[in-house]
Image (cartoon, rainbow, N blue to C red):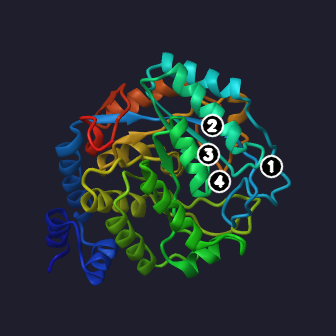
């Protein structure tokens, strides 16, 4: 079967055999990318029209107890300039974001023991009290189910936890021995059981990654059916064990965005900052390849340059208002329209299943 026919099969059935996924991932046929991007756009517009959703990102701590080999805020990076935002700082970011039109806030940070469950519950509860019409997303790593339940009961709606790789051996290559592939996957199952809208995802081009690993990722996504998938290219950080490894590519990331859109037609799919870091037009290209979410930074400008998971991160000096103006222009240039709403997953848009 020709590769373009496999694209149509994936769109129509939501699945491919392993060898068919491999053909799609490795295809070098002229015009193939344009074809798969076009099919991905058609599918995303069926579910979401021309709408692109904003997520206001608040990077509230760059302390982390973990020592992941790829991450610039890893525990053993003694050169990282550490910071923590106060609860009032976080609430101020949300207030400012709300005035700018954001209706989803994403709290993202390292796994920082200072932010106990009680502190996180207080933060979530107060955001919910001040902005009851907004969605609250947490991206704060691995916890036990009881903690996730407390955050949900306090008002969190969504949780992002990238699985990074669905292959256990590859996971061990990327992470320290005290971290467990089984626990990461259990966390994702727990989040879904509780009732969160759950996001997962992986790095592309990470050290040791093979085509068969990506196929395993796709099969995991197919079976788990997350509400959101965050993917981006691996970008090395100079103070990590992977400082000298090659970065992932724009081409591979765009190909995978389109494949995931066809695999999970109603998924929320960001065009990430990492994609914009390796290509000045990366986020626009991501939107044209099936993405429908962007995540401008609402963090205070004096800490943005300190939350560096990888080198050369963009938008570390922009004011939030400047950032959102830039995003509106980029989205418009890509042929889409920013909508100032919570931007719920299609399954939740009418308020059902919640």
Which quarter of the image is occupied by the N terminus?
Answer: bottom left
152 lies left or right of 309: left
Q: Which residue is mark 3?
A: 313
Q: Please, is residue 272 above or below residue 299 in the view?
A: below
Q: Which residue is mark 2?
A: 121
Disc 3 from disc 1: Cα separation: 14 Å
Q: Position of residue 272 (x, y in %)?
A: 47, 47
Cβ–Cβ under 8 Å for marks 4 and 3: yes
Q: Which residue is mark 4?
A: 310
Disc with the residue nearer the chain's start (1 vs 4): 1
Disc 2 from disc 1: Cα separation: 27 Å
Q: Please, is residue 301 above or below residue 204 in the view?
A: above
Disc 1 from disc 4: Cα separation: 12 Å
Residue at 20% from the left image edge and 53% from the top image edge = 38
Q: Circle 1 sits in a helix, a strand or a loop, which is it?
A: loop
Other residues around mark 4 within 10 Å, as few (<14) / some (14–19) / many (≥20): many
Q: Circle 2 sits in a helix, a strand or a loop, which is it?
A: helix
Q: Position of residue 11 (x, y in %)?
A: 18, 62
Q: Which residue is mark 1?
A: 80
Residue at 68% from the left image edge and 47% from the top image edge = 308
Q: Circle 4 sits in a helix, a strand or a loop, which is it?
A: loop
Cβ–Cβ under 8 Å for marks 2 and 1: no
Q: Which is in the foreground here, disc 2 or disc 1? A: 2
Disc 4 from disc 3: Cα separation: 7 Å
Q: Position of residue 261 (x, y in %)?
A: 28, 56
Cβ–Cβ under 8 Å for marks 3 and 1: no
């Amino acid at each position: 079967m020709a590769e373009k026919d496999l694209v149509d099969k994936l769109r129509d059935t939501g699945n491919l055999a392993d060898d068919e996924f491999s053909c799609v991932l490795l295809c070098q046929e002229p015009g193939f990318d344009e074809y798969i991007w076009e099919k991905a756009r058609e599918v995303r517009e069926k579910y979401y029209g021309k709408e692109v959703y904003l997520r206001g990102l608040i990077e509230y701590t760059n302390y982390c107890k973990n020592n992941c080999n790829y991450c610039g805020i890893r525990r053993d990076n003694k050169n990282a300039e550490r910071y923590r935002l106060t609860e009032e700082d976080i609430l101020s970011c949300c207030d400012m974001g709300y005035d700018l039109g954001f209706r989803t806030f994403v709290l993202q940070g390292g796994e920082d023991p200072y932010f106990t469950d009680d502190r996180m519950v207080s933060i979530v509860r107060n955001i919910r009290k001040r902005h009851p019409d907004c969605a609250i997303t947490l991206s704060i790593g691995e916890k036990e189910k009881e903690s996730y339940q407390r955050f949900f009961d306090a008002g969190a709606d969504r949780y992002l936890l990238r699985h990074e790789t669905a292959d256990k051996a590859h996971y061990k290559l990327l992470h320290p021995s005290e971290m467990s592939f089984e626990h990461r996957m259990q966390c994702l199952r727990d989040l879904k059981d509780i009732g969160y809208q759950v996001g997962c995802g992986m790095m592309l081009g990470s050290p040791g990654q093979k085509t068969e690993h990506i196929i395993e990722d796709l099969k995991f996504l197919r079976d788990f059916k997350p509400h959101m998938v965050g993917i981006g290219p691996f970008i090395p950080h100079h103070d990590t064990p992977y400082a000298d490894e090659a970065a992932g590519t724009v081409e591979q990331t765009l190909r995978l965005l389109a494949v995931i859109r066809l695999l999970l037609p109603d998924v929320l799919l960001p065009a990430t900052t990492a994609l914009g870091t390796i290509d000045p037009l990366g986020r626009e290209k991501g939107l044209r390849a099936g993405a429908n979410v962007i995540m401008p930074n609402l963090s205070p400008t004096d800490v943005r340059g300190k939350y560096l998971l990888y080198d050369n991160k963009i938008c570390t000096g922009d004011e939030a208002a400047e950032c959102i103006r830039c995003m509106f222009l980029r989205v418009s240039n890509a042929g889409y329209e920013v909508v100032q709403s919570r931007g719920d997953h299609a399954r939740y848009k009418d308020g059902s299943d919640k």
